[in-house]
């Protein structure tokens, strides 16, 4: 049997400084240490099948990351969670394992929590008619207007909650927003702690 499972995990504290490539290696090693019956690719260089839904930028924490694996023997989702957590640190914790419902290509946006002492200035920043940035693409560089892409949910004290496009078609990094925020006031991006708190599909449903 080959059964697909989606593993949900938190990437917090020191783990936010692990690059995506190193995170892949870390999870592959954890799966081997946990002795889970994970399917491996075939050929001259077999490796554990492991795909991440939405790679996270360096320096950003998340409480809603996920990756997919294939299991070759009968095992419960909870057993996968327990065994994997035993092979990981407190900064990388598995909080749920389930069968996939949506495809990663259905992801449309993500919710971010930004903690910064400049939060009270954010509405003024958003009041611009346009927020133009230069974004790197596969074809080079392109001018992008962030204004219609930033969906502000709330501002409370030093906390900003907003939604940004995420997925295969369009992805906006919150650091790009902060860079434009700092530039608007004639300076560097404000010091901020960023956490991805949720990922949503095109129909507004939480990605599971």
Image (cartoon, rainbow, N blue to C red):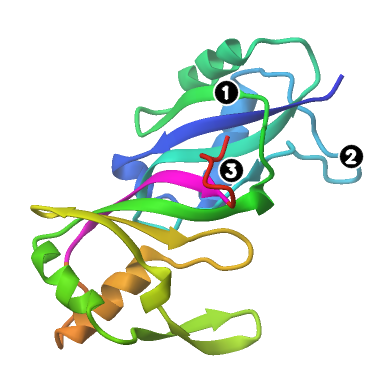
Q: Quadrant of the N terminus?
A: top right
Residue 192 numbered mark, or none: none
Place of residue 156 in the rendered image (x, y in percent of width and height, measured from the top left): 13, 51
Place of residue 175 in the rendered image (x, y in percent of width and height, measured from the top left): 34, 68
Q: Which residue is mark 3?
A: 25
Q: Which residue is mark 2?
A: 42
The residues tagged by marks 2 and 3 sit, at their Cα atoms, a distance apart of: 18 Å
Q: Which residue is mark 1?
A: 97
The answer to whether 135 appears left or right of 163 in the picture is right
Of the residues under marks 2 and 1, which one precedes in the sequence?
Answer: 2
Q: Which numbered disc, 3 or 1, marks the residue closer to the eye?
A: 1
The answer to whether 118 appears left or right of 172 in the picture is left
Place of residue 60 in the rendered image (x, y in percent of width and height, measured from the top left): 35, 53
The residues tagged by marks 2 and 1 sit, at their Cα atoms, a distance apart of: 25 Å
Q: Nearer the viewer, residue 84 or 156?
A: 156
Q: Secondary structure at mark 2?
A: loop
Quarter assignment of residue 117: bottom left
> Image point 53% across, 18% down: which residue?
81
3 within the magenta span: no
Give the residues drawn in magenta, as a range: 191-201
Q: Secondary structure at mark 1?
A: strand
């Amino acid at each position: 049997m080959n059964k697909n499972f989606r593993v949900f995990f938190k990437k917090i504290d020191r783990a936010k400084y692990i690059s995506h490539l190193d995170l892949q290696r870390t999870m592959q090693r954890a799966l081997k240490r946990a002795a889970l019956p994970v399917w491996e690719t075939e050929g001259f260089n077999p490796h554990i099948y492991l795909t991440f839904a939405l790679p996270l930028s360096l320096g950003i924490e998340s409480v809603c990351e996920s990756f997919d694996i294939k299991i070759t023997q009968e095992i419960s989702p909870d057993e996968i969670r327990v065994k994997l957590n035993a092979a990981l640190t407190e900064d990388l914790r598995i909080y749920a394992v389930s069968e996939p419902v949506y495809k990663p290509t259905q992801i449309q946006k993500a919710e971010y929590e930004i903690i910064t002492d400049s939060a009270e200035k954010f509405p003024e920043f958003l009041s611009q008619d346009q927020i133009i940035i230069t974004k790197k693409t596969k074809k080079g560089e392109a001018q992008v207007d962030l204004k219609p892409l930033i969906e502000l949910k709330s501002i409370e004290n030093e906390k900003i909650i907003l939604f940004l496009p995420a997925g295969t078609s369009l992805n906006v990094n919150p650091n790009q927003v902060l860079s434009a925020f700092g530039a608007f006031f004639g300076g560097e991006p404000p010091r901020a702690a960023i956490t991805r708190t949720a990922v949503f599909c095109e129909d507004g449903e939480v990605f599971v």
